[in-house]
Image (tube, rainbow, N blue to C red):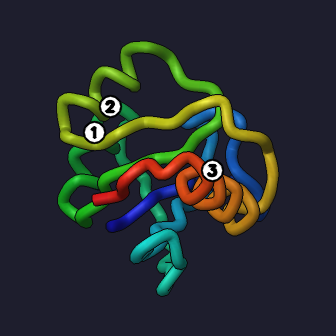
């Protein structure tokens, strides 16, 4: 499974439209297996399709408008928003810990 986190200055970006890069993590059974930094210069409303083409299934972000969440969902990507402005690794590890503790099944 691939999880994307938009970042600014090495931390999760508070706003999806204000990120500098996106880190795409490869996750297997709640373990991080790899990561790749990507830059994106397109329009924000085209981001869901761009991420979908890269196999991303989940995006973890800060603040997002409902319209953007709907665009992600239409592209088959789950959107988790309201995450704290921490390093992307810390944000993802916390999400994976929550998944592990609650028994949620990842794809």
Which residue in the structure is indicated by mark 1?
46
Asked if the residue under mark 3 is in contact with the one under mark 1, i.e. CB atoms within 8 Å, the reply is: no
7 left or right, relative to 58: right
- Determine the secondary structure under disc 1: helix
Viewer can see residue 64: yes
Q: Specify the quadrant of the image occupied by residue 68.
A: top left
The residues bearing labels 1 and 2 have C-alpha atoms spaced at a distance of 4 Å
- Determine the secondary structure under disc 2: helix
- Determine the secondary structure under disc 3: helix
Q: In the image, is residue 27 above or below residue 15? A: below
Q: Nearer the viewer, residue 29 or 8?
A: 29
Foreground mark, 1 or 3?
A: 3
Q: Specify the quadrant of the image occupied by residue 11.
A: bottom right
The residues bearing labels 1 and 3 have C-alpha atoms spaced at a distance of 30 Å
Residue 100 at x, y = what percent? Answer: 56, 59
Q: Specify the quadrant of the image occupied by residue 26.
A: bottom left
* Residue 99, numbered label: none
Which residue in the structure is indicated by mark 2?
45
Q: How many marks?
A: 3
Give the residue at x 31% y 21%. Answer: 70
Q: Nearer the viewer, residue 98 or 32?
A: 98
Sequence order check, earlier mark of 2 and 3: 2
Residue 78 at x, y = what percent? Answer: 35, 39
Q: Nearer the viewer, residue 41 or 1?
A: 1
Asked if the residue under mark 2 is in contact with the one under mark 1, i.e. CB atoms within 8 Å, the reply is: yes
Give the residue at x 49% y 85%. Answer: 34
Sequence order check, earlier mark of 1 and 3: 1
Give the residue at x 37% y 15%. Answer: 67
* Residue 98, numbered label: 3
Residue 58 at x, y = what percent? Answer: 39, 50
The residues bearing labels 2 and 3 have C-alpha atoms spaced at a distance of 29 Å
Q: In the image, is residue 26 above or below residue 105? A: below
């Amino acid at each position: 499974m691939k999880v994307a986190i938009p970042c600014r200055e090495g931390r999760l970006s508070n706003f999806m439209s204000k990120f500098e890069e996106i880190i795409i993590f490869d996750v297997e059974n709640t373990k991080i297996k790899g990561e790749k930094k990507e830059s994106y210069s397109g329009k924000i409303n085209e981001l869901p399709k761009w991420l979908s083409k890269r196999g991303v299934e989940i995006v973890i972000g800060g603040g997002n408008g409902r319209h953007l969440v709907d665009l992600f969902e239409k592209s088959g990507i789950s959107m988790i928003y309201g995450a704290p402005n921490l390093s992307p690794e810390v944000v993802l590890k916390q999400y994976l810990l929550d998944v592990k503790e609650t028994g949620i099944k990842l794809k």
